Amino acid sequence: MSDTGPEPEDATGPLGSVEAEIQQMLGLFDAPSFSRRGQDLEDAITRLHGRCARARSGMLEMVVLRLRQWASVATGPDDWDDVLEGPVAPLWPIAGAPDPSWADSPAPGRRRRAVARDLAASVERFNRRWSRFVRGLDLGPVNRRIEAYNRYYILEKECALGSHRLATRFFQPYDPLSADLLLDRHPPLPAPRLLR
């Protein structure tokens, strides 16, 4: 038999020390519980905002079409005061519409008024549908994650770091989500008003 040298000391030690080393090694490959909790919450909030953004974008398709129609009867962003109470230009970025291709000359007043009326109706319809969608979301699962994060994050971090001062450093609790907060982040549209 060839001599491979002395056996390592901890191989002959009690079974508990081997298990402790294995647990320590496993801990190197997994994030601590406070980190997983924070990442889980961030992922849940990101998914919720992504869902809202996708739904909002889908609901805005008709508004974007109406904005293109308006651009085909107006000569620029300042060409609105004969049929509307205020400018339409702010709607483009809020609705996520592509930059308009303005008409070379304004359409007749009657046609402009019809297009403006369709645009206003489309925006009102979107706002109703969007508000109903957001208020119908079940925010319970995300808010339960927020509550658990606010309650346990510092405790779990303190256990991992061994210091309350370090655990509380940079900690910012999350406010529960509500429909109003989501509507601030993913807003309804300012409704254009027709001149009387």
Image (cartoon, helix red, strand yellow):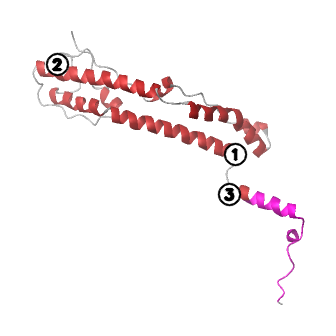
- Residue 18 lies in the magenta-colored region: yes
Q: Using the image as rendered, state which of residue 145 and residue 42 is in the foreground.
A: 145
Query: In the image, which residues are magenta?
Result: 2-25
Are the residues at dot 3 and dot 1 in contact (C-beta closer than 8 Å)? no
Looking at the rendered image, the quarter that the N terminus falls into is: bottom right
Secondary structure category for the residue under label 1: helix
Neighbours of disc 3 within 10 Å: few (<14), some (14-19), many (20+): few
Q: Against 188, is 39 above or below?
A: below
Write down the residue under mark 2. 113
| Image quadrant where residue 20 sits | bottom right
Q: Which residue is mark 3?
A: 29
C-beta proximity under 8 Å, tags 1 and 2: no
Q: Which SS class for mark 3?
A: loop
Q: Amino acid at mark 1?
A: Ser
Residue 86 left/right relative to 109: right
> Is 24 rendered above or below residue 166?
below
Structural distance between the alpha carbons of marks 2 and 3: 65 Å
